[in-house]
Amino acid sequence: MILGHLAISALLHRYAKAEWTPVMAAAVFPDAVDKTLCQLLHLTPTGRMWGHTLLSLAISTALVGHTWGRRAARSWALGYLSHLAADIEGDVPWLYPFGDLDLTTPSPGVWEIMQMKLTDPVGIGIELALIAWAAHSLRHALKARAVAEGADLRRC
Ligand SMILES: [Zn+2]
């Protein structure tokens, strides 16, 4: 779910030194695109389509790189790839439109998705563990920054 994606991106920010804004935006971008197109606008047959492809990853990374630079593009790509990897428990159309897209299973609605996620204790446990780890590591990073800034202030 979305909090798990955000937690993974927060961990990428902390440990892979990804820039905060692009890595966090990329964490939600695939679902923002595909869930909007499918569940809200009813324009696509599945909630994992254009936003969940390597083509979209490549194009959006190029656009981010062109607009905000290489470091932002690297951060965006990390966040995006982490989203696709975290979705691996279901169908991810990595190669669409060049590969097949499984449309035999109807896409669940938002409420059905929530019910499935909330009745999966293992999934909830993994997501809560990721959120706790991300919160702990960010708190630790903020403390370290405050200590470093305090040390800088004492030098002045
Ligand atoms: Zn997704």
Image (cartoon, rainbow, N blue to C red):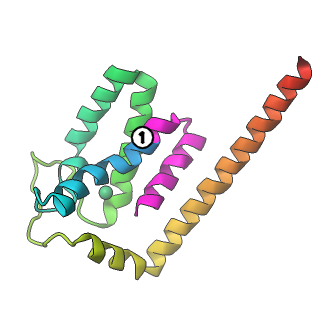
Ligand 1's image quarter is bottom left
Instruction: Give the SS element for disc 1.
Output: helix
Quadrant of res 131: bottom right
Q: Residue at coordinates 10% horizontally, 47% vertically from top-left?
A: 97
Percent across and percent down for residue 56 are 23, 40
* Residue 83 among magenta residues: no
Q: Residue at coordinates 27% horizontally, 34% vertically from top-left?
A: 60
Front residue of 153 and 134: 153
Q: Is residue 125 above or below residue 11?
A: below
Q: Residue at coordinates 70% horizontally, 50% vertically from top-left?
A: 139
Percent across and percent down for residue 78 are 42, 40
Q: Is residue 18 left or right of residue 65?
A: right
Percent across and percent down for residue 92 are 24, 58
Q: Residue at coordinates 34% horizontally, 78% vertically from top-left?
A: 116
Give, as a three-letter code, the residue at label 1. Answer: Leu
Q: Is residue 120 left or right of residue 143?
A: left
* Residue 13 among magenta residues: yes
Q: Which residue is mark 1?
A: 78
Q: Which residues are magenta?
A: 1-23
Quadrant of res 70: top left
Q: Is residue 48 above or below residue 26?
A: below
Q: Is residue 145 left or right of residue 84?
A: right
